[in-house]
Image (cartoon, grey):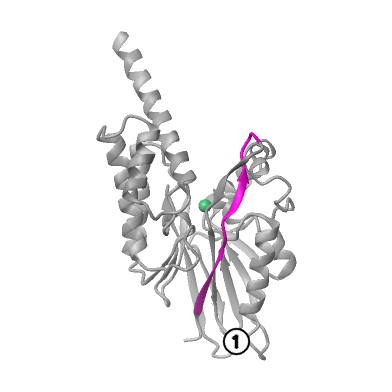
Amino acid sequence: MPLRASVFVSPPIPWTAPSGKVGGPWSPISSTLIRTTTSAVLVDTPITEAQNASLADWIERELSNGTERPASLDYIYITHGHGDHWFGTNALKRRFPGVRVVATPDVVAHMRGQIEPKSFARSWGSQFPKQIDMGFVLAEPLAASGEFQIRDGVTDETFTLRAVEVGHADTHSSTVLWSEDLKLAVAGDVVYGTVHQMLAEANTAALRREWIRAIETVEALGPVVVVAGHKLADEIDGPWHLRNSKRYIEDFDRLIEGGEVGNARELVARMKGLYPSRFNEGALVAGAVAAFKVKEKQKQKQQAGGKL
Ligand SMILES: [Zn+2]
């Protein structure tokens, strides 16, 4: 079978806090290349111009085929709307002019929201000042089947890739890209490697349950290879990342909802104790703070209700 896949991991880079100081590292970001001898699909891009220049160089090497005619990059698929998975579409489009950027309609809408000038200036623009290429190229929406094909020009075989919508994971409208031929799930932020999971948007018990269901949707596909959106560069992309990501959410949820921790600081300490080898504590802190903000609001509402 001429179909194969490889993964490029953009190393962690520092992000800037509102104070102007370094806020910490941004987790490493994976980009997966699925390809035949003549055609290729890239899944997700990193954030900054420098990161995307390195990714483009890697893609060029991958597609070169040694002495043969290089394969062409025909598609870039975006798993979800967060800018740290697509801000390189413009840079890659310049380097590979024929490429089509595709995503599900909900992801396209989310992408559009991320570059709305006010929200961009508050978030990505201030976290990565003057590092992001602003000529944003949005994806075109895929048809309802979520399917698209790449062909192998040597064997004349065609391979189908399918966008699978899984609901809310670390953000809403998340998807994975599925290759039945490779039993490969390119999982975006539905699944994490040995990196702390970002639960700032999945900040209620209901949303955490939804993230677990999203992982179970991927499990039901029966994958042999699972590529996490945030992972260490050298770790193997196995289906155990599904179980590990699920357990992380279950532990996070149990500590809060079971009343084992009373504030964000205690939650971070307990989670670090359970997951000492996961990279980027900052992602954990963001999730813990967001979860307790919601808890506090719920408590205030209950107290106000009790007074009535
Ligand atoms: Zn992400």
Apparent side of residue 113 relative to residue 214 in the rendered image (left or right): right
**Labels in figure, total:** 1
Viewer-side residue, 257 vs 146: 257
Q: Is residue 201 visible?
A: no
For label 1, the residue is 153
Viewer-side residue, 215 vs 270: 270
Viewer-side residue, 68 vs 158: 68
Residue type at mark 1 is Gly
Residue 234, relative to residue 108: is it above or below?
A: below
Residue 217, by quadrant, is bottom left
Residue 1, relative to residue 96: is it above or below?
A: below
Q: In the rendering, at what x and y percent does residue 109 appear?
A: 58, 47
Residue at 68% from the left image edge and 87% from the top image edge? 69
Q: In the rendering, at what x and y percent does residue 213 appear?
A: 33, 51
Residue 271, by quadrant, is top left
Q: In the rendering, at what x and y percent does residue 131 appear?
A: 71, 51
Residue at 67% from the left image edge and 91% from the top image edge? 67
Apparent side of residue 307 relative to residue 75 in the rendered image (left or right): left
Secondary structure under badge 1? loop
Viewer-side residue, 27 vs 150: 27
- Magenta includes 193? no
Residue 192, relative to residue 289: is it above or below?
A: below
Stretch in magenta: 4-19
Residue at 64% from the left image edge and 88% from the top image edge? 66
- Tell me the chief SS of the magenta region: strand
Q: In the rendering, at what x and y percent does residue 145 appear?
A: 47, 63
Residue 21, by quadrant, is top right
Q: Is residue 22 visible?
A: yes
Apparent side of residue 92 relative to residue 221 in the rendered image (left or right): right
Residue at 56% from the left image edge and 84% from the top image edge? 152
